[in-house]
Amino acid sequence: MPNPSTHRRAGRLATLAVAVSATTSFFATAPAGAAEPAPAASPPTPTACPATVADIADCWTGQDSNGAFYAIAVPHEWNRSLLVHAHGGPDLGETSDPSRSVDDLDRWAVMVREGYAWAGSSYRRGGFGTEMAAIDTESVRKIFIDTWGKPRLTLLHGQSWGGDVAAKTAETFGNAADKPYDGVLLTSGVLAGATRGYDYRVDLRAVYQYYCQNHPRPTEVQYPVWMGLRPGSTMTSAGLRSRLQECTGFQSEPTERTPLQQRNLDDILGVTGIPERTLESHLRFATFTFRDIVSTRLGGRNPFSNRSIRYSGSHDDAALNKGVERFSADQSAVRDLSFDSDLTGDVRVPVLTMHAIDDPTAFVEHESAYRATLTAAGNADHLVQTFTHESEHSSLSNSEYATVIHALETWVDTGAKPTPASIANACPEHDSDYSTGCLFDPAFHPGSYASRVNPRPGATRWPALTAGQYSAWDRQGGVGIAP
């Protein structure tokens, strides 16, 4: 069944109301985050480019009719193709951040240096909302076309959570009659969606509290850990870091940790499989972003569960499983989070992905979830996945970014599907320009998502959201997360 048109999607989501659960007195009686009237849209205004592209491009910034700031760059020697960028995060500011899209332009300057025009939205607000971000991503594409005309090709790029945003944008808007996107590039993508893609952080939040008992402390107001953090808490990232250090000594040299700190750290890492170097960032997400998802976006309803999970990898698994906090999801919250962020695999243009094998933030097994999703939807022929021997998440080698964007463009132009080997073989030519390395591994295949993340009942079948269920909820209305 075709996806709804851009006009229908934007109009329906603009009036979407999130139901509020009365399961806890911590929550207000109306959903938080009610939108302020959006400022008047501003056309692209010339601005100084980031230094990384200032010598080769002209830049513009503006704000769309939803209040989302955006940035655009057009090379002096434009190849007539446009790259529409979806940024990661989510950021947690209450309003659109005018610097975010400019920062991302600077970060992926390689695309502009390769001749592509670049357009990116900062989204209308911070906080979770995949469909909101998809609408704002589509908005900046339209702004570009209204000003510069239709490009020869339009390619869609998403990084990290932006990978989920870009994939959702392709599913929601990409099948329109005018075929707005010709190809999709997803790098370091969170491609399992939110109802499954954050389960390892759900486990971290529960396991951390079992061992550390300081988030909250026994002397503080108690709340279930699936909230992430209670509404109204004034805890900061620095405060959270202090508690993590208190419990695990993660900032100290191993010789300076107490035996209990070392055992706590070993147990938390052993059970969750989270790398030590990103333990703090994962716990921040499971604290502050979970609060945003649960309290602000879902009106206090819980979309997470660990009721069936048998934890292992600690010094005493029996004690852990007996004492860890258990909870079950509110199915209406699962429905709304799924509709907003899970992927159906309904994509009908070439999709190329690139992912570091040792990505410490979005585990490489997210790619297995995405392949399984497209396979179940009958669209696996549209997908090529590449993997690199890197240990980064936020950015990979510029030589590799240049390689994959050209491989995608060639695939779109010729219809000849690349292979991981052909992409790896093409990289040295681009490395002669950037000298940042070519670390592709054409033979690598990630394990299943369930091999890395404790699967919940029924969560080994993909997609997490079928196109039929998506369409049914869409016709029902009132489902999802408000912009």
Image (cartoon, rainbow, N blue to C red):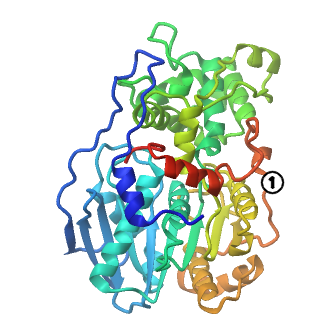
Q: Position of residue 420 (x, y in %)?
A: 74, 76
Residue depicted at 72% across the width and 39% down the height: 273
Say which of 97 and 211 sits in front: 97
**Measured along the vertical axis of the image, is residue 281 above or below residue 430?**
above
State the image quarter where residue 334 is shown.
Answer: top right
- Numbered circles on residues, count: 1
Residue occupying the point 68% across, 23% down: 264
Q: Which residue is mark 1?
A: 447
Q: Quadrant of the N terminus?
A: bottom right
Q: For the residue carrying disc 1, how many other residues have a C-alpha within 10 Å: few (<14), some (14-19), or many (20+)?
A: some
- Please identify the quarter of the rendering in which residue 279 is found: top right
User: Residue 215: x percent and y percent?
Assistant: 52, 20
Task: Name the residue located 30 percent from the left edge and 58 percent from the top edge.
Answer: 68
Q: Nearer the viewer, residue 27 or 78?
A: 27
Mark 1 belongs to which amino acid? Gly
The secondary element bearing badge 1 is classed as loop
Q: Position of residue 272 (x, y in %)?
A: 70, 35
Q: Is residue 103 visible?
A: no
Residue 110 in view: yes
Residue drawn at x 49%, y 32% is 287
Residue 218 drawn above or below residue 2 = above
Extreme residue toward the top, this view: 219
Q: Position of residue 110 (x, y in %)?
A: 47, 77
- In the picture, residue 402 is in which quadrant? bottom right
Give the side of residue 29 with respect to residue 255, left or right.
Answer: left
Reply above or below: 262 against 338. Answer: above
